[in-house]
Image (cartoon, coloured by chain):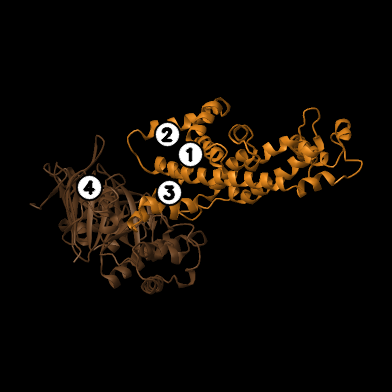
Amino acid sequence: MADVQLTGITKTFGAVTVIPDLNLSVPDGSFTVLVGPSGCGKSTLLRMIAGLESPTAGGIRIGGTDVTDAEPSDRGISMVFQSYALYPHMTVAQNIDFGLRLAKVPAAERAARVSEAARILSLEAYLDRKPGQLSGGQRQRVAIGRSIVRHPEVFLFDEPLSNLDAALRTQMRVELAQLHQSIGATMIYVTHDQVEAMTLADQIVVMKDGHIEQVGAPMELYDRPASEFVASFIGSPKMNLLPGRAIARDDVKIAGIRPEHLHIESEGQWRAVAKVVETLGADTIAYMDAEGLGEITVRLPGHIRLKAGERLALSPEAANLHLFGHDGRRMEHSA
Amino acid sequence: MSRSHFWRNFARVAVLCVVASFVLAPMLATALGGFKSNAEIRMNAFALPQDWDVSFYGAILADPAFWRYLGNSLLISTGTVALTLLVGAAAAYVFAQIRFFGSRMLFSYMLLGLMFPFATAILPLFIKVRDIGLLDTYWAVILPQTAFGLSLAILLFRTFFEQLPKELFEAARIDGCGYVRFFFRITLPLSTPILATVGVFVFVQSWNNFLLPLVVLNSREAFTWPLGMMQFRGEYVTEWNRTLAFVTLTILPAIVFFLAAQKYIVAGLTGGAVKG
């Protein structure tokens, strides 16, 4: 069992409080993604779990053991860095092997574990190369290999894919998902990319300014965002956030509607002019100007041909309207 | 190639030749002087010798004292280099890696050594060395040279160490690697360029040091080569040709050392550590 429990975590740097009193539970074997804009404290939180930073107050438990003051190497964790952090003067095999050698693991077992990791990550052909001779994706695999061989209970990933190009990122995302399925260890993953969060996670933690905005399964966050911030952060293209008067209600500050929940109807209640139309094949994304409401994005079926400048009437699916009160929190439907 | 391009290159080569001649001409005169008679040196210092007289070189090479001086110099210089690199790198590593109370003040204090001329310290140094009982030993030269070389070494090392990516240490910490092991296993192997640079500086300075050995070494057995050179200065005549031959032969090891270390000075090893 290696669940991660954070209780009352506070972190201050000098006079600045980065994380005020945070509680989080990461279930055993889950793939939890911490997501949020840069500067929201998600990396700091991960580094505290790793033991690279110590919390100003609060406690961290991994698998039931209090590790708040334990050394990183004694926590049963391993971490993959955004910049890979490979040792440039060592070969791939030595890089993967380094932690095991320090832990005085017998040579035979070390060799077995390295070759197992190399097999999982298809690195067999590169074991004698130096990191400088590898491509970005291969380096990232080596960094992951270095984590795997330690057989940690918790894997920590700090934006591991952000240095890769788009195609490679998609591929590595699939590989990471497969890795999680085959190993079954707890994984905590930090990213600012909501697509990575949606595709990888079975639990997403949305953070903002050191607070947790919402914790839940990807579709839970997508279908029932707890706040205006989560609503705007999760989903692509972004949810339309319209003023309350769009649905003629004064108690509602923001009425949110996702682009795919808008339909063209001749009797539609919102009139809009198409400004830019993106034809993606399966979908057509139209960026429109709604009268008196500002910008609005609509996702239409791919077969609909639309030109810039065309006038349309739109109507939302009432069941998929998200209402947020003046405190920015979700309101339950009462219409 | 265009005309203006040619002249620009020509001018560049010409300037470089002039600069190089400032360095090379005295060395050439020294090497050639070893083949000439004393009278010829006075009249034609830079010309090729009329007769290539190899007897002076031969006599020096055949003299066991010459080899002893060279051996002493080599021992003292390599000792100084090894000690400076080890102590300097370790101190700089602490300054670069660990934040502790007073670290900046301590660092500035170390750097004060850069402004302290060696010659002014020579008398107190002699007294200290005598009191400790190191007179006439290799340590009498090695230890003060190391002490004076440290400030420059620490300055250069710290700058280099601070540029090593922080994630390397964090990754190593997660692997279970402490400060000391990280220093020997990661920092030092990645720092060969700066180790070579500082090593060359210290070696050449130690190799050519005259004042300190002169003051603290008394017996001929312990003499370094600059002291050994003095044997050709008589009360009335100085045997310039022997001196020049001697200098030429003793400078060779320093040049060889420089050439060997040169490729490390140029090469950087950090490629591939982080995104590249």
What residue is at 15 percent from the left and 60 percent from the top?
A64
> Position of B231 compared to A168: left or right?
right
Q: Nearer the viewer, mark 4 or mark 1?
A: 1
- Helix, strand or loop status at disc 3: loop
- Nearer to me, B275 or B243: B243
Please state the horizontal and vertical placement of residue A322, each as a whole percent of the image. 17, 52
What residue is at 26 percent from the left and 58 percent from the top?
A74
How far apart in space, not on screen, are marks 2 and 1 (Cα)? 9 Å
Residue B165, numbered circle: 3
Residue hosting label 2:
B107
Q: State which tag comes first along the sequence, 1 or 3.
A: 1
Badge 4 and badge 1 both on one subunit = no
Residue hosting label 4:
A229
Residue B154, numbered circle: 1
For residue B206, what is the image quadrant?
top right
Task: Chain A: give its colour.
Answer: brown
What residue is at 87 percent from the left and 44 percent from the top?
B53
- Helix, strand or loop status at disc 2: helix
Q: Nearer the viewer, mark 3 or mark 4?
A: 3
Inspect the image, locate mark 3, and give the three-letter code of the amino acid beneath it. Pro
Are dots 2 and 1 in contact, CB under 8 Å?
Answer: yes
What residue is at 22 percent from the left and 51 percent from the top?
A69
Please state the horizontal and vertical placement of residue A173, each as a whole percent of the image. 35, 64
> Position of A244 compared to B6: left or right?
left
Q: Nearer the viewer, mark 2 or mark 3?
A: 2
Q: State which tag comes first along the sequence, 2 or 1.
A: 2
